[in-house]
Amino acid sequence: MLSNNDIKRELIKRKNIGIHPLMVENIKGSSINLTASPHAWDVQSKKSVVDGKKINIPAKGTVSIFTREAVWVSRRIGGSYHPRVSLVAKGLSNISTTLDPQWYGLSLVTVTNYSEKPITIRVGEAFVSVMFYYLKTPATKGIIDNQASRPDLYSKFILEDRDEEFLGEQWHRNYHGIMEHMKESDSYNYLLKDKNKFRRNVWDFFNHNFISVVIGGVLLFILQLVISHFGILGK
């Protein structure tokens, strides 16, 4: 399982994980939260359940919600989706599905409201978490079971013009689009600066005159112990 530091490192390297739009503050101890987009539909009526900045999930109803973020993972990474406890406590169903190696695209997450009252999720609100795992061996190259952003599923809903425009955008439908948009984002540059800042701080620490003297003294002491040890053995 990847920790927050592992996730940040992989995002910076851009070899195994890509996410756009990337919200650094949503990277938690061992997961990253994904947020709700303004594209969501009732599974039964097939109609949009978005009202301005709100996604309305009717009592006993089931709704499919697209994430704002598109995710790409390499053959070396798998994952799983999990609900946020705060939303489950209100009556939303558990989420239990996988993130397959080599996936790229938006995530279409389906939830059921088991309560007797409507539940609202705000557009932009974190509503699902993804945990990443390193695979012991890379998955077979080229085996991808589902199309990017799942047109086989969202094509069954009644799409409004704004839905078709967003879902038709190419950046979230291919690896290069996701990675290039992430690379050019302020959040990615923030991660790079944070990494470089850490490196500078470590370098400055070891270059500090006092620290250099202390380290030199410790090394000299160890060297004297080694010489003394071998000197005694040689007598």
Image: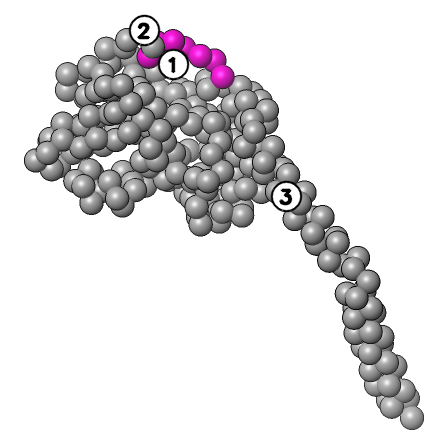
Q: CA distance from mark 1 to mark 3?
A: 34 Å
Numbered label attached to residue 195: 3
Q: Which residue lies at the image location 54% right of the left edge and 46% below the top edge?
A: 6
Residue 15 appears in the figure: no
For the residue labelled by badge 2, is the local secondary structure a helix, a strand or a loop? helix
Q: Which residue lies at the image location 29% right of the left edge and 40% below the top edge?
A: 83
Say left or right for 229 vs 193: right
Numbered label attached to residue 167: 1
Give how far across and how far down residue 201 sits, in percent: 69, 52
Give how far across and how far down residue 120 sits, in percent: 21, 30
Q: Which residue lies at the image location 39% right of the left edge and 38% below the top edge?
A: 33
Numbered label attached to residue 161: 2
Q: CA distance from mark 2 to mark 1?
A: 10 Å
For the residue labelled by badge 1, is the local secondary structure a helix, a strand or a loop? helix
Give how far across and how far down residue 15 sits, in percent: 59, 34
Give how far across and how far down residue 16 sits, in percent: 55, 35
Identify residue type, mark 3. Answer: Lys
- Residue at the right extreme, as displayed: 235
Nearer the N terminus, badge 2 or badge 3? 2
- Residue at the top extreme, as displayed: 161
Is 129 located above or below residue 5 in the figure? above
Identify residue type, mark 2. Answer: Asp
Please identify, in this view, whether the residue under mark 1 or under mark 3 is nearer the observer.
3
Q: CA distance from mark 2 to mark 3?
A: 41 Å
Query: Crowdedness of circle 2 by 10 Å Cα count: few (<14), some, many (20+)?
Result: few
Quarter containing the C terminus: bottom right
For the residue labelled by badge 3, is the local secondary structure a helix, a strand or a loop? helix
Q: Which residues are the magenta region?
A: 163-171
Identify residue type, mark 1. Answer: Leu
